[in-house]
């Protein structure tokens, strides 16, 4: 156990974890619930798939406790595609994470979409050889997760809602907070670390670089090619799409359109072309009336 | 006179790391999204990413043919997924390679992310370089390919004419030898 975060970041193991996250830049990671969907996602150009039993919209509808997926499901998806396969464990549930590591998934998502197992602690991710992605709603939360060993950050958004408003809020907040840090003097950074509830060394890193030390992706509420282009223009380096594809009326066409929009996010002519004539998007939720206890983004700390 | 910029295929993958490496060597970089972006470039880098994704996006806009034409007169460097795209054949029907290197390639040769590793290179050109192999491919090289570096007996860096392909990620870390060597071939 070393107290020096910088040396942990430079170790081979973390270089490999962050390296895989960097290779996914500019891509779309799609939620899939069976091998058939995984093949559709891969053929549409997904850079990775997230294997899970129920998409977030159904978890939201069904209620009850949402857990790690059955290993048999994960293995059937691993056998179906050649792109990286990710899987989710509950926040703080390191035994689920150990199982996912034993299954050799390529990335573990410690996810607020599942029911949290620990209301105080997230997983100590330095203990694992497999990289982790974690959600964040602000910079302090992002840096706490990185301090615990996460190799990728994603906005939480509001999973299963088909509504991009929360992902936009989280992205803007994180980027505004990073810009503010770059304007501070060195003598102000300890106080900033206290206010953010974030490790001092990582606050210093962001103040110097103006960016997180790991890739920063967006998740939660992406339903259209325009949504993907929006979060990319707001600074997300890649896009997770959960319910937005396989809850729509023509998943294969929508998946390919979102892939192209994520690549050509700054080219409105391409965005218009790929948005043209897509069948219905997922219905979506208006979030204004959604009570706090039903908001997945409130999970984790 | 400032040399022409180097293009980096920006459809998907780790564009930033290559741009950083070029900047370290005093060269400017420009993203390539469409065939017209190849005009005025001194060379092109195909970065690491997912080869199935890249292959599909390349074909969609005719960028595959444009790059094959560009490569007749300009150097190309491919790393990991980029190397897969440069080969003549792959073990995966989902990838349509460009045929710039006379080699056959196995995707994900070493396995999943758990099997990714960093190792020191052997061979004539970049001895001792710490190289990251991330879900890396393996190559079966044939003449006229020149093997520049090996790991555990397998060729991992290859040259054919002005083109270079690496199974590892020379853009990660600070060792710029591969980029420097490739720029010297132009």
Image: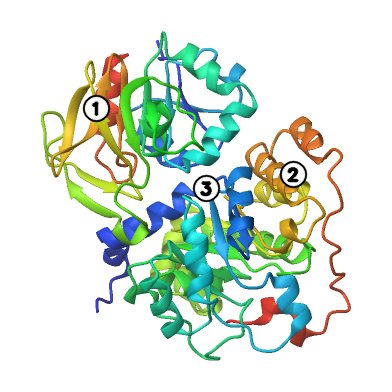
Question: Which labelled disc corresponds to residue B141?
Answer: 1
Q: Which residue is mark 2?
A: A253
What's the distance in space between the residues labelled 2 and 3, CA to CA? Answer: 22 Å
* Location of residue B154 in the rendering, given as x and y in whole percent from the top left corner: 18, 38
Left or right position of B174 against B34? left
Q: Residue at x 48, y 36 (%)?
A: B93
The picture places residue A27, in percent across and down from the top left corner, at 57, 47
Alpha carbon separation for disc pair 2 and 1? 38 Å
Neighbour tally class for label 2: few under 14, some 14-19, many 20 plus, Cα within 10 Å: some
Left or right: A29 in relation to A129: right
Q: Secondary structure at mark 3?
A: loop
Q: Is residue A147 left or right of residue A119?
A: left
Closer to the camera: disc 2 or disc 3? Answer: 2
Label 1 near label 3: C-beta < 8 Å?
no
Mark 3, Cα crowd under 10 Å, few <14 / some 14-19 / many 20+, is many
Q: Quadrant of the N terminus of chain A?
A: bottom left
Q: Mark 3 — residue? A: A25
Q: Which quarter of the image is occupied by the C terminus of chain A?
A: bottom right
Answer with mark 2 or mark 3, whichever residue precedes in sequence: 3
Query: Marks 3 and 2: in contact by CB < 8 Å?
Result: no
Q: Is residue B23 visible?
A: no
What is the count of numbered marks? Answer: 3
Tell me if I can see residue A124 in this picture: yes
SS label for mark 1:
strand
Name which quarter of the figure residue B79 lies in: top left
Quarter-of-image position of residue A132: bottom left
Q: Is residue A242 above or below residue A100?
A: above
Read off the chain for label 1: B
């Amino acid at each position: 156990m070393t107290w020096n975060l910088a040396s942990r970041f430079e170790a081979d193991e973390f270089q490999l974890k962050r390296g895989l996250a960097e290779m996914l830049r500019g891509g779309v990671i799609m939620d899939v619930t069976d091998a058939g969907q995984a093949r559709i996602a891969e053929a549409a150009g997904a850079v990775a798939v997230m294997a899970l039993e129920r998409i977030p919209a159904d978890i939201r509808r069904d209620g009850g406790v949402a857990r790690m997926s059955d290993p048999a499901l994960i293995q059937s998806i691993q056998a179906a595609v050649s792109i990286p396969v990710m899987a989710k464990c509950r926040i703080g549930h390191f035994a689920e994470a150990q199982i996912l590591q034993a299954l050799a998934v390529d990335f573990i998502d410690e996810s607020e979409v599942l029911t949290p197992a620990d209301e105080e602690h997230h997983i100590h991710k330095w203990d694992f050889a497999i990289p982790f992605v974690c959600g964040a709603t602000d910079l302090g939360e992002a840096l706490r997760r990185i301090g615990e060993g996460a190799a990728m950050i994603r906005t939480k958004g509001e999973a299963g809602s088909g509504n991009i408003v929360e992902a936009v809020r989280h992205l803007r907040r994180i980027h505004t907070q990073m810009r503010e840090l770059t304007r501070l003097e060195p003598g102000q950074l300890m106080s900033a670390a206290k206010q953010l509830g974030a490790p001092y060394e990582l606050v210093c890193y962001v103040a110097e670089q103006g960016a997180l030390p790991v890739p920063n992706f967006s998740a939660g509420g992406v339903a259209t090619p325009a949504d993907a282009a929006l979060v990319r223009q707001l600074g997300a380096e890649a896009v997770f799409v959960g319910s937005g594809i396989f809850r729509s009326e023509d998943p294969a066409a929508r998946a390919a359109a979102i892939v192209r929009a994520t690549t050509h996010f700054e080219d409105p002519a391409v965005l218009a072309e790929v948005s043209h004539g897509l069948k219905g998007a997922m219905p979506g939720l208006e979030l204004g009336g959604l009570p706090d206890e039903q908001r997945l983004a409130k999970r984790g700390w | 006179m400032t040399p022409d910029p180097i293009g980096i295929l920006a459809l998907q993958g780790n564009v930033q790391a290559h741009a950083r490496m070029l900047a370290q060597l005093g060269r400017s970089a420009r993203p390539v999204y469409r065939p017209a972006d190849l005009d005025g470039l001194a060379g092109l880098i195909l970065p690491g990413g997912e080869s199935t994704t890249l292959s599909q996006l390349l074909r969609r806009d005719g960028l595959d043919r444009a790059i094959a034409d560009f490569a007749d007169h300009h150097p190309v460097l491919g790393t990991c997924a980029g190397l897969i795209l440069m080969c003549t054949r792959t073990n995966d029907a989902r990838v349509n390679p460009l045929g710039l290197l006379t080699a056959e390639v196995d995707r994900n040769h070493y396995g999943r992310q758990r099997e990714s590793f960093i190792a020191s290179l052997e061979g004539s050109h970049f001895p001792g370089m710490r190289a990251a192999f991330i879900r890396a491919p393996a190559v079966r090289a044939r003449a006229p390919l020149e093997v520049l570096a090996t790991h555990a007996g397998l060729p991992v860096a290859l040259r054919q004419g002005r083109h270079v392909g690496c199974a590892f990620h020379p853009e990660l870390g600070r060792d710029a030898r591969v980029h420097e060597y490739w720029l010297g071939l132009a």
